[in-house]
């Protein structure tokens, strides 16, 4: 059974990096890994996605393990506006398997 | 341009009634998705449409749930004989093509369904 697992919550201090892990041990070779975040009382918004190589964009970086069974979303310098629930998603076939989400708390 | 829109924004219904939720995707987006988010919970993927076809309906919670999409645009999610456990926010999203190949999804504001 396909599972995508994430820790329930993480805390960080403002201006410090945050590393959010995700386990997707049953991933197949063509399955993409996506990350979305949901700010309080808002709909989800795209953060980043990747397949095999590490990816960087203006919001974050995505480090994908060599065996692709896990990945890590990296917020380089957390701000108070980054406080949200971050979802790791495995896109496989015609289905999306969501992790339970990691609630990120940023302390000033 | 216009984003994803959903209607109604709020729906209160009585147990046993049928409800219909509507989603208008971004123009030109061929892929459309439905999700459910129960209070304080994470996102649950329900179904995905590519054009008017839903390749996999196994994510729908029960046979009381159905969805259709017509004209490659508007989609409706229908819940028959609603139960209290159906109370949740139902989110719709769309993307240019199937997100599995790397396309970004854009989410609507959701419909909050309350079953009394």
Image (cartoon, rainbow, N blue to C red):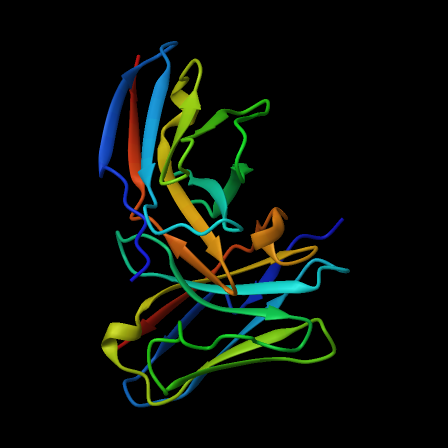
The residue at 29%/48% (across/down) is A100
Which quadrant of the view contains residue B70?
bottom right
Left or right of B42? Residue A45 is right
Name above or below for residue A31 compared with residue A58.
below
Place of residue B57 in the rendered image (x, y in percent of width and height, measured from the top left): 46, 77
Quadrant placement of the C terminus of chain B:
bottom left
Q: Nearer the viewer, residue B58 or A75?
A: B58
User: Could you tell me how many numbered marks the image carries?
Assistant: 0
The residue at 53%/51% (across/down) is A30
Name above or below for residue B63 compared with residue A20.
below
Q: Nearer the viewer, residue B89 or B55?
A: B55
Question: Hey, which residue is sitting farthest top in the picture?
Answer: A15
Name above or below for residue A53 compared with residue B58.
above
Which quadrant of the view contains residue A23?
top left
Place of residue B47 in the rendered image (x, y in percent of width and height, measured from the top left): 48, 70
The residue at 32%/52% (across/down) is B42
Which quadrant of the view contains residue A97?
bottom left
Place of residue A2 in the rendered image (x, y in percent of width and height, measured from the top left): 33, 58
Left or right of B97? Residue A55 is left
Name above or below for residue A89 compared with residue A9.
below
The residue at 27%/85% (across/down) is B15
Place of residue A3 in the rendered image (x, y in percent of width and height, measured from the top left): 30, 54
Q: Nearer the viewer, residue A31 or A105?
A: A31
Left or right of B88? Residue B21 is right
């Amino acid at each position: 059974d396909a599972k995508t697992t994430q820790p329930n919550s993480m805390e960080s201090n403002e201006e410090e990096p945050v590393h959010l892990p995700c386990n997707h041990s049953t991933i197949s070779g063509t399955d993409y890994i996506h990350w979305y975040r949901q700010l309080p009382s808002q709909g989800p918004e795209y953060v980043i996605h990747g397949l095999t190589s590490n990816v960087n964009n203006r919001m974050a970086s995505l480090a994908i393990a060599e065996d692709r069974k896990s990945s890590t979303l990296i917020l380089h310098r957390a701000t108070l506006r980054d406080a949200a629930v971050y979802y790791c998603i495995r896109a496989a076939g015609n289905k999306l398997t969501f992790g339970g989400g990691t609630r990120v708390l940023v302390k000033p | 341009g216009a984003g994803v829109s959903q209607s109604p924004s709020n729906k209160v219904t009585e147990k046993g009634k049928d409800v219909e939720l509507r989603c208008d995707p971004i123009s030109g987006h061929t892929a459309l998705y439905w999700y459910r988010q129960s209070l304080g919970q994470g996102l649950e993927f329900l179904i995905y449409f590519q054009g008017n076809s839903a390749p996999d309906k196994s994510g729908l919670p029960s046979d009381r749930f159905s969805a259709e999409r017509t004209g490659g645009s508007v989609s409706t999610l229908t819940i028959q004989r609603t139960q209290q456990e159906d109370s949740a926010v139902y989110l719709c999203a769309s993307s240019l093509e199937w997100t599995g190949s790397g396309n970004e999804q854009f989410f609507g504001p959701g419909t909050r369904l309350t079953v009394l």
